Amino acid sequence: MAREDGTGDVGGGADAQDDARGGGADDAIYAKIHAAIAAQDLPPGTRLREDEMRQIFGVSRARIRKVFSRLAYAGLVTIEPNKGASVFQPTPKEAREIFAARRGIEGTIVRLLAGRLGKAELASLNRHIALEVAAEARRDWQEMVRLSGEFHLLLAEIAGNGILLRFLRELITREALVILVYEKPGQPSCSHHEHQMILDALLTDDDAQAVLLMEEHLGNVEDRLDLDRDTRKSVDLGRLFAGA
Amino acid sequence: MAREDGTGDVGGGADAQDDARGGGADDAIYAKIHAAIAAQDLPPGTRLREDEMRQIFGVSRARIRKVFSRLAYAGLVTIEPNKGASVFQPTPKEAREIFAARRGIEGTIVRLLAGRLGKAELASLNRHIALEVAAEARRDWQEMVRLSGEFHLLLAEIAGNGILLRFLRELITREALVILVYEKPGQPSCSHHEHQMILDALLTDDDAQAVLLMEEHLGNVEDRLDLDRDTRKSVDLGRLFAGA
DNA sequence: CTGCATTGTTTTGTCGACAATCCTATGTAC
DNA sequence: GTACATAGGATTGTCGACAAAACAATGCAG
């Protein structure tokens, strides 16, 4: 999957110029960049130049610009006026807000779901956990991260609220960026075991327990980070050389 | 405030061509359309033609297009490919999702806030409620609706989570559209009395009570609607003329 | 050598024109 | 009279060219 000089590589396949024309060309480009960010192929802070992207995807600059705009609204890229777009690079404060917001929304979803899981939904969730177990057996960390996020999205989907689903999707992708910045990457962030416990709790009517487990589960991820240290390139030189 | 033929009037002042050029021209146009929708000057389903808007605001069509795009992402307008933009017209299902999502998010905010209100914040909230009381005394319904929404945004702001604040802002504006479609407009939707009770509960550590009050408060609005009847213009002609 | 002004290049922002699509009105066949 | 096909107008979608701003490199004064 290595290609060129590695500077502007976006996503997996799709060299260039393949499905430029057509109805959902924007969506395809959006999905590719989104996937590249979620898969951590585009590290936070990476500059996204319009002309570069234009060449890579073989489309007009206006289209790239439109896609950037959408990505910016989803919080995945930051657009600074007259400075262009770059992959979102969360500050510690933003990181904490993302975690808190996610806990709140997933708590809501769990409350909606507790004691109301149908047979088909339960089967679907069990199947998903099986996939997670298999991925762990294969030691496929990247796949585990993907599946882990998907489990939560699956819960949201079953809850049947498209708005909460959209919010959560945004938060999960942004949280992936947070993890990438503030923790060593590659670590599986969710254990399927905890997923199983949440699912068990959901089968009872005890929503308080389910919420508790979910919040703990999400808290485990946050606890593993070092949010006090701003690892971005701006360093406090004054403090650094204070004792010299 | 009556003007022209009333077809394309957007917002209050700003005839045209005033602050077209300049840094935040987009933001100004966005804010005006947003305000017009929130103030119910642009009823749901209203077609928003690009060229019309271009003339009204005296800017290029591309700029209008960009603003529409942002409004669409915020869920305030719907863009159908090759068909243009129109003010979001919620279905009953979407309406219910908006209410449920809002209950969840405001519940989260209340939980964040319970027992943690500082002196300055408390004063700010009390001041706001006083404004609501004054507006009711004046029988200024429109102002009451605006203040009512603002109270909830103020809570979110105090909670200090910018992401939840953004989500809630979107939901509140969309809920205004829901109310406009499914209820006789002009009715004040929130009573300052309930706001006061929530505030009282927040001063204690009893977050469960505060959450309960908030959910009841929000539920009162939903209960006043008739979400089973789809009041949009598509009528079932077959059923309508069944007995003729 | 350092700091600052200046010029040239790169990158983003904006606009107008053209193409494609959709909606409406008219005409025609049955 | 109704249904369908067709032509015209209106509206949105897309692109390329130009303008403005930011960035980098160079030259110059102190």
Image (cartoon, coloured by chain):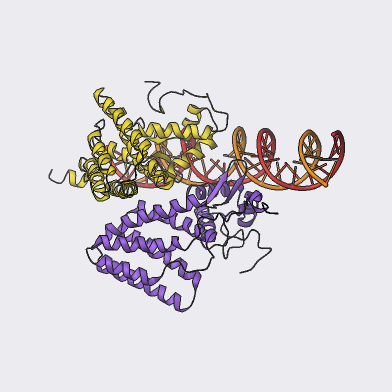
Chain colours: A yellow, B purple, C red, D orange
Image coordinates of residue A244 in percent, x first then y, are 13, 43
Left or right, A145 with respect to B191, comes to: left
> Based on the displayed image, in which of its 4 quarters is residue A216 positioned?
top left
Image: A18 above or below A42:
above
Left or right, A61 with respect to A215, comes to: right
Left or right, A112 with respect to B229, comes to: left
> Based on the displayed image, in which of its 4 quarters is residue B81 positioned?
top right
**Residue at left offset 55%, top offset 33%:** A60
Task: Work out whether residue A67 or residue A123 is closer to the camera in this orientation and state it.
Answer: A123
Q: How many marks?
A: 0
Image coordinates of residue B210 in percent, x first then y, are 29, 63
Task: Work out whether residue A102 or residue A97 is closer to the camera in this orientation and state it.
Answer: A102
Q: Is residue A55 visible?
A: yes
Considering every residue shown, the one lying at the far front of the view is B243
Task: Work out whether residue B150 or residue A180 is closer to the camera in this orientation and state it.
Answer: B150
Image: B216 above or below A42:
below
Considering every residue shown, the one lying at the far left of the view is A243
Image coordinates of residue A209 in percent, x first then y, are 23, 48
Image: B143 above or below D20:
below
Task: Work out whether residue A92 or residue B112 is closer to the camera in this orientation and state it.
Answer: B112
Q: Is residue A43 visible?
A: no
**Residue at left offset 57%, top offset 28%:** A21
Image coordinates of residue A175 in percent, x first then y, are 31, 41
**Residue at left offset 25%, top offset 66%:** B118
Q: Is the N terminus of chain A in the top left, top right, bottom left or bottom right quadrant?
A: top left
> Based on the displayed image, in which of its 4 quarters is residue B184 positioned?
bottom right
